[in-house]
């Protein structure tokens, strides 16, 4: 074997060794980066869960969240407010009537139910008869159930508009309920 062939083999061996070393270092860096990335994602997830828990347990005001976990969450209490069941029923009626008026409708009649079996558990029901334009019905339903306090549409009856009578207004019978919680 000549000196040139021996030198070429040595150079090739060194080049292969360096390439292997660089590959091992690159793989180690890749695994390290992957591990730190997973850890940082888990930390962010834990921080978001802690912020949500603090918000739900009332330890953090809704305007001071950490992160974007509850940025779109409505502010306020999920329960109807009022010192008594009657006051909470009036607040429910006022909220629903203002929503009907805001979408351009008219409240025709209303009845707050404080005597049912559910009322003993703090649930207040409201039966509202109103008329609204057809395009405003979806906004009415959304606005009733969106936001705080939590309100639920228990029953919805819609009567199609009568041609020539009240224009394009539909008669809507709506039963809405919410829970009243008296702080003790």
Image (tube, rainbow, N blue to C red):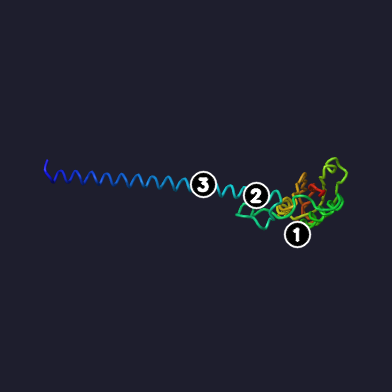
Seen at 75% across and 59% down, the residue is: 102
Q: Residues within 10 Å of mark 1 (few under 14, many from 20)?
A: some
The numbered dot on residue 52 is 2
How far apart are labels 3 and 2 at the CA level?
20 Å
The residue that disc 3 covers is 39
Secondary structure beneath disc 1?
A: helix
How far apart are labels 1 and 3 at the CA level?
48 Å
Secondary structure beneath disc 3?
A: helix
Name the one closer to the observer, 32 or 150: 32
The quarter of the picture where residue 10 lies is top left
**Residue 89, horizontal then vertical, whole percent:** 84, 51
- In the displayed structure image, the side of residue 115 where residue 162 appears, left or right: left
Q: Earlier in the sequence, mark 2 or mark 1?
A: 2
The numbered dot on residue 159 is none
Q: Residues within 10 Å of mark 2 (few under 14, many from 20)?
A: many
Name the one closer to the observer, 174 or 131: 174
- In the displayed structure image, the side of residue 71 where residue 22 appears, left or right: left
Secondary structure beneath disc 2?
A: helix
The numbered dot on residue 102 is 1
- In the displayed structure image, the side of residue 145 where residue 86 appears, left or right: right
Seen at 34% across and 45% down, the residue is: 23
């Amino acid at each position: 074997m000549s000196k040139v062939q021996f030198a070429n083999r040595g150079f090739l061996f060194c080049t292969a060794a360096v390439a292997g070393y660089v590959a091992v270092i690159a793989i180690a860096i890749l695994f390290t980066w992957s591990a730190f990335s997973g850890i940082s994602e888990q930390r962010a997830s834990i921080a978001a869960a802690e912020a949500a828990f603090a918000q739900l347990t009332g330890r953090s005001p809704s305007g001071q969240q950490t992160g974007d976990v509850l940025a779109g969450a409505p502010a306020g209490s999920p329960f109807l407010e009022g010192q008594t069941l009657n006051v909470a029923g009036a607040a429910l009626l006022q909220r629903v009537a203002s929503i009907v008026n805001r979408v351009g409708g008219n409240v025709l009649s209303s009845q707050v139910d404080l005597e049912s079996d559910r009322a003993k558990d703090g649930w207040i029901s409201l039966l509202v008869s109103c008329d609204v334009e057809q395009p405003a019905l979806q906004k009415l339903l959304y606005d009733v159930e969106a936001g705080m306090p939590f309100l639920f549409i228990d029953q919805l009856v819609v009567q199609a508009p009568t041609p020539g009578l009240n224009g394009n207004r539909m008669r809507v019978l709506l039963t809405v309920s919410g829970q009243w919680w008296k702080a003790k």
